[in-house]
Image (cartoon, helix red, strand yellow):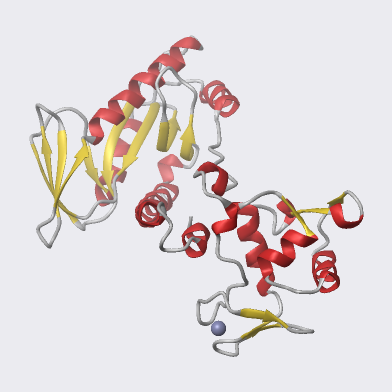
Amino acid sequence: MQALVARLPSTHPQYQKLQRELKKKEEGDFGEQYILNELQKLQPLSDCHIFHNVIIPTILPMQIDILIITPSGIIILEIKNIRGTLHFKNNPRQLIRTTETGEVHTFTHPEIQLQQYMQAMLHFLDTYHITMPVYGAIVFPFNNVDVHGEGSGLPIVMGKELPLYIYKFITQKLDIAMDDILHIILSQLQQKNPFPLCRYYHIEPSVLQRGVYCENCGQFSMQKLKATWFCQKCEHRCKEAHVSALKDFYMLVGDTMTNRECRDFLKIDSPYVTKRLMQRLLLTRSGNGKSTKYNLSLLNGNR
Ligand SMILES: [Zn+2]
């Protein structure tokens, strides 16, 4: 998303939306990562299984922020990194946020989604003839939020309080065959694969900003010299500057790249220089001559 927003012209019709989505994602990921780290430190969870951001195919669409399989049951955590003053409203259920500047936003009540996930999980387990309790909580990772609510339904837990909440369940050991459940869940897990992002968001790859990014001044201003890349704006030099551009291409446009595509994307004139550059990366190739395609999936292992 960072690469896409960086290379999308700010005049593109989807730019504003994607920029907002990126910001939300960065905040959400930050909160989820914090909670994951805290959970991994908890001794009673050391023999439990913790999953982050999982999709399980069930009757209802289910994308769980954090899923914990314990000998006492399954715990589903819905992480909300929202700042401001929050009011949980019942009837109709809504979450209303007021920011420091007085802006008011209305969100879907997180309980609705969490209840749906818990129901779907019970149904999922039932299809494998497993009976075990499923718990859920809405978690606010940080103390940057002031929560007011009409208390009902599922627990709302602050990050600091989460260990206590978890301990409460873990102490009630039910001798559940964790390995069986783990095996079933692992076999059903789906990874969401939105790559390449241009296809996912229906963006024409030709609108993307070309060029190699300067890590020093943040512009697409690196020029290929004989032995290095040189920034025309700030004179920064970096031998490997092309690698991040190739990763961008992989994430945004596609798995393979021809010499012509590479020249166009990195803004290099010479096919010969481009060929040497690609060969030095030791990528696997298919095809011959002008139609040679380099496979970018081996660039540092993954996206
Ligand atoms: Zn620069």
204 with respect to 292 (left or right): left
| Residue 235 point in image, percent of width and height | 60, 90
Residue 30 falls in which quadrant of the image?
Answer: bottom left
Q: Is residue 303 visible?
A: no
Q: Nearer the viewer, residue 179 or 26?
A: 26
The residue sitting at the right extreme is: 288
Question: Residue at coordinates 68% horizontally, 69% vertically from top-left?
Answer: 266
Q: Nearer the viewer, residue 233 or 183?
A: 233
| Residue 66 point in image, percent of width and height | 41, 39
Q: Nearer the viewer, residue 215 or 158?
A: 215
114 with respect to 257 (left or right): left
Question: Residue at coordinates 61% horizontally, 59% vertically from top-left?
Answer: 248
| Residue 116 point in image, percent of width and height | 32, 24
Q: Is residue 205 visible?
A: yes
Q: Nearer the viewer, residue 164 or 294?
A: 294
225 with respect to 201 (left or right): right
| Residue 101 point in image, percent of width and height | 12, 62
Question: Residue at coordinates 41% horizontally, 63% vertically from top-left?
Answer: 10
Residue 184 falls in which quadrant of the image?
Answer: top right
Give the quarter the ligand 1 occupies. bottom right
